[in-house]
Image: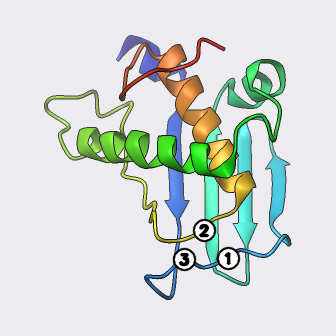
Amino acid sequence: MKNSIYILTVIICILIGCTSSKSVIPAKEKTTASSGDTIRIANDKLEYEVLIIDSGFSSWLLTNAYPRDYHSQTYLESKNRIWVSEWNNRAAQPLRYNPNLYEMSINYDPNIDYGYEVNYLIYNYMVYFQNTYKQKLFGYVPLR
């Protein structure tokens, strides 16, 4: 509770897909960094929205994240699948894992192509989260 009182950690992902096959998201994604440490990605056509609210993430993203296009979208998707799965596992077990860190599950469907930007931001949030809160979701985590 010590660190979690000071830092609000919430990832809200509402990712809605109409089919089980891969959908392609047009390049018309809206990425906005609204007030302070909130990053919002939305695509009104496919009706999805990703909000990342965490004090410090915006500045970490600007100073520590690998540049866009450093990793391929396939790489980001594979890491996100693994990390989001483990995140959801921990969110479902609040007595075993800190419920202040894993407040809610993330609805990430690997059969939907969310595009590079969504995968880039989720990937980098997961790297930030694991390094900042000393959590290891799975496998290698860059120390950036």
Labelled disc at residue 65: none
Q: Quadrant of the C terminus?
A: top right
Would you name the residue on which mark 3 appears?
22
- Circles 2 and 1, Cβ within 8 Å, touching? The answer is yes
Would you name the residue on which mark 1 appears?
24
**Of the image marks 2 and 1, the number of the one nearer the N terminus:** 1
Looking at this view, name the residue that lies furthest to the left: 95
Q: Quadrant of residue 87?
A: top left
Q: Secondary structure at mark 3?
A: loop
- Circles 3 and 2, Cβ within 8 Å, touching? The answer is yes
Q: Is residue 79 above or below residue 140?
A: below
Residue at left offset 63%, top offset 79%: 47
Image coordinates of residue 115 in percent, x first then y, are: 69, 62
Along the line of sight, the residue nearer the viewer: 16 or 100: 16
Would you name the residue on which mark 2 appears?
113
Residue at left offset 45%, top offset 14%: 3
- Circles 1 and 3, Cβ within 8 Å, touching? The answer is yes
Three-letter amino acid code of the residue under disc 2: Asp
Circle 2: is it few (<14), some (14-19), or many (20+) Cα within 10 Å?
Answer: some
Image coordinates of residue 45 in percent, x first then y, are: 73, 84
Q: Secondary structure at mark 1?
A: loop
Q: Is residue 46 above or below residue 62?
A: below
Residue at left offset 67%, top offset 54%: 118
Along the line of sight, the residue nearer the viewer: 70 or 4: 70
Residue at left offset 15%, top offset 29%: 96
Three-letter amino acid code of the residue under disc 1: Val
Image coordinates of residue 42 in percent, x first then y, are: 72, 66
Q: Secondary structure at mark 2?
A: loop
Looking at this view, name the residue that lies furthest to the bottom: 18
Q: Quadrant of residue 97?
A: top left
Three-letter amino acid code of the residue under disc 3: Lys
**Of the image marks 3 and 2, the number of the one nearer the N terminus:** 3
